[in-house]
Image (tube, rainbow, N blue to C red):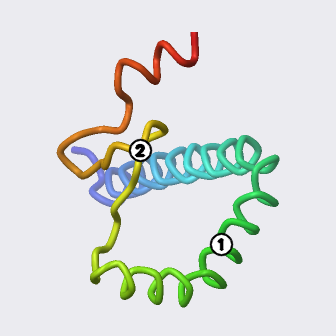
Amino acid sequence: MSDPTKLSEASIEKVLMEVLIRFGLIALLIYLCAHVFAPFTGILLWGLIMSVALYPLHQKLAKRLGGKQGGGVDIDGRECDARARCAHADVGQFLW
């Protein structure tokens, strides 16, 4: 008969190897993501700083415009909302 302690050691080694492989793959993925986003960290940091600094101005402006939040205007002055995107056909003609 087989020894139950050898079976449990083998299964422990298998589980440990799977955990180490997963940990290695996750570490590799994190490293690659950091490597890809590294050139953009400066602009992301400035975007964060500007969004925090300009939030009070945004609130005052929204209050003056009737309390609307998140409204936008297209290049030709048409209003945009969540249902209608701002990329109209004339914007495509403008870019070409």
Residue at 55% of width from left, 53% of height from top?
23
- Would you say 58 lies left or right of 27 here? left
In the displayed orientation, state which residue is furthest to the left. Answer: 83
Mark 1 element type: helix
Residue at 54% of width from left, 18% of height from top?
94
Badge 1: residue crowd in 10 Å (few <14, some 14–19, many ≥20):
few
Camera-nearest residue between 70 and 43: 70
Q: Amino acid at mark 2?
A: Gly
* Nearest-to-viewer mark from 2 and 1: 2
Res. 96 image quadrant: top right
* CA separation in Å, label 2 and label 1: 28 Å
Q: Earlier in the sequence, mark 2 or mark 1?
A: 1
Where does residue 46 sit, x and y in percent of width and height? 75, 68
Residue 71 to residue 56: above or below: above
Camera-nearest residue between 24 and 82: 82
Q: Quadrant of the N terminus?
A: top left
Q: Which residue is mark 1?
A: 48
Residue at 30% of width from left, 38% of height from top?
85
- Would you say 81 lies left or right of 44 here? left
Residue 44 to residue 1: above or below: below
Where does residue 26 sit, x and y in percent of width and height? 55, 50
Mark 2 element type: loop
Residue at 28% of width from left, 83% of height from top?
67
Camera-nearest residue between 11 and 85: 85
Q: Amino acid at mark 1?
A: Leu
Q: Which residue is mark 2?
A: 77
Res. 87 image quadrant: top left
Badge 2: residue crowd in 10 Å (few <14, some 14–19, many ≥20):
few
Residue 92 to residue 12: above or below: above
Where does residue 90 sit, x and y in percent of width and height? 41, 20
